[in-house]
Image (tube, rainbow, N blue to C red):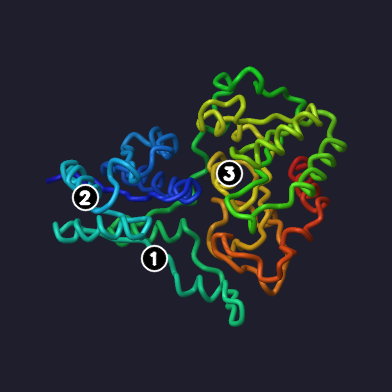
Amino acid sequence: MKKEHILVIRFSALGDVAMAVPVVWALATQYPDIRITVLSKGFARTLFEDLAPNVNFMEADLKKEYHGVKGLNALYRRLVAKQFTKVADLHNVLRSEYLRMRFNLGRYRVEHVNKHRHQRRQLTSYKHKVKKPLPSSFENYAEVFARLGYPVDIKKFHSIFPKEGGNQNLLPAAIGPRKSFEQWIGIAPFAAHEGKVYPPRLMEQVIFQLIQKHSNIRIFFFGKGEQEDKYFQLWCAQYRQCLYVSKHCETMYQELILMSHLDAMISMDSANMHLASLTGIPVVSIWGATHPMAGFLGFNNNKDNIIQLDLDCRPCSIFGNKPCQRGDYACLQNIPPERIVERIQSIINN
């Protein structure tokens, strides 16, 4: 009898791909006799390569090698050669729909994720908003595997690392290892869209207050980009307790190791919220235009650690990419820094 070999398709942004990790882990550990191959962009290799013995990773460059219909046809031929028996589309966009169509014509067993687009539109509607929680992405992904005949229990997932965290010996000399008397806090203060970014002037107050309250604190800034370069270098020059992580870590794997040894992470609704969640640490998440109700809260995040304001206009966007209807981003501007600091204090004290 042919051994089951499931193809899992999930391209998209890092945060969305990271949310598939607990579900794929649950599938792999609960059904060790099946083979699983995750098809994604190259950056995701770190997340899946050593996840479980029966999980493989396959990279697909959709911008160059597999661009357009001709490229997708070439990718399909390559996939068919792997002799998959079932296909799980966790993305459900035009590219993955085309691959699904090819697999369906080839009489493969294919299932795809339900994104609940109608409910999303209701949740973000300006005049007729329906504030009803949507299923989480984890639940949506798990439902796909259940329809393929493999129901999974994702509750047993804790971290991609052992309980003691990642190997600190792999961290750059400028970072570790951690001393027993230190408090380590991560901050990922930026995101792809303005509607998800806590104002830097307020975040600096968070940094200042944390340093004032803890003489042995170290603060690590996560993220890359123009905004990060501008503010991280400024803050690191101003506060000796701060360190710009990407200036020292060469790989995402090193950043994940560092995250696993933090006392807590402060993050926007962004990829770093999801990455930190995969290491099993407490995550204090700050929400503006978006809302946890849309189903994108980090895995196993404590709801007490969600920082947000109850405004009638929230959420106005699923991804935070729409202009503010009020014009002032009150959902972020009006969050007091003290509220974030108090939440971190509570975590450290416990």
Location of residue 165 in the rendering, given as x and y in whole percent from the top left corner = 57, 31
Q: Is residue 112 above or below residue 268?
A: below
Q: Is residue 201 above or below residue 289?
A: above
Q: Residues within 10 Å of mark 2 (few under 14, many from 20)?
A: few
Disc 2 element: helix
For this view, does 51 lie left or right of residue 310? Answer: left
- Disc ID at residue 272: 3
Rendering coords of residue 173 (x, y %)? 63, 17
Q: Residues within 10 Å of mark 1 (few under 14, many from 20)?
A: some
Q: Nearer the viewer, residue 173 or 140?
A: 173
Examine the image and state in which quarter residue 344 appears: top right
What type is the residue that disc 3 sits on? Asn
**Residue beneath the point at 24% across and 53% down:** 69
State the image coordinates of residue 164 (x, y, percent, origin top left): 58, 30
Q: Are marks 1 and 3 in contact (CB under 8 Å)?
A: no
- Sequence-wise, the earlier of marks 1 and 3 is 1
Q: Which mark is residue 114?
A: 1
Q: CA distance from mark 3 to mark 2?
A: 34 Å
Alpha carbon distance from label 2 to label 1: 27 Å
Q: Residue at x 29, y 43 (%)?
A: 36
Residues packed near mark 3 inside 10 Å, few (<14), some (14 to 19) or many (20 plus): many
Disc on the earlier residue, 3 or 2? 2
Q: Which mark is residue 70?
A: 2
16 and 29: which one is in front? Answer: 16
Decide if residue 227 is on the left or right side of residue 117.
right
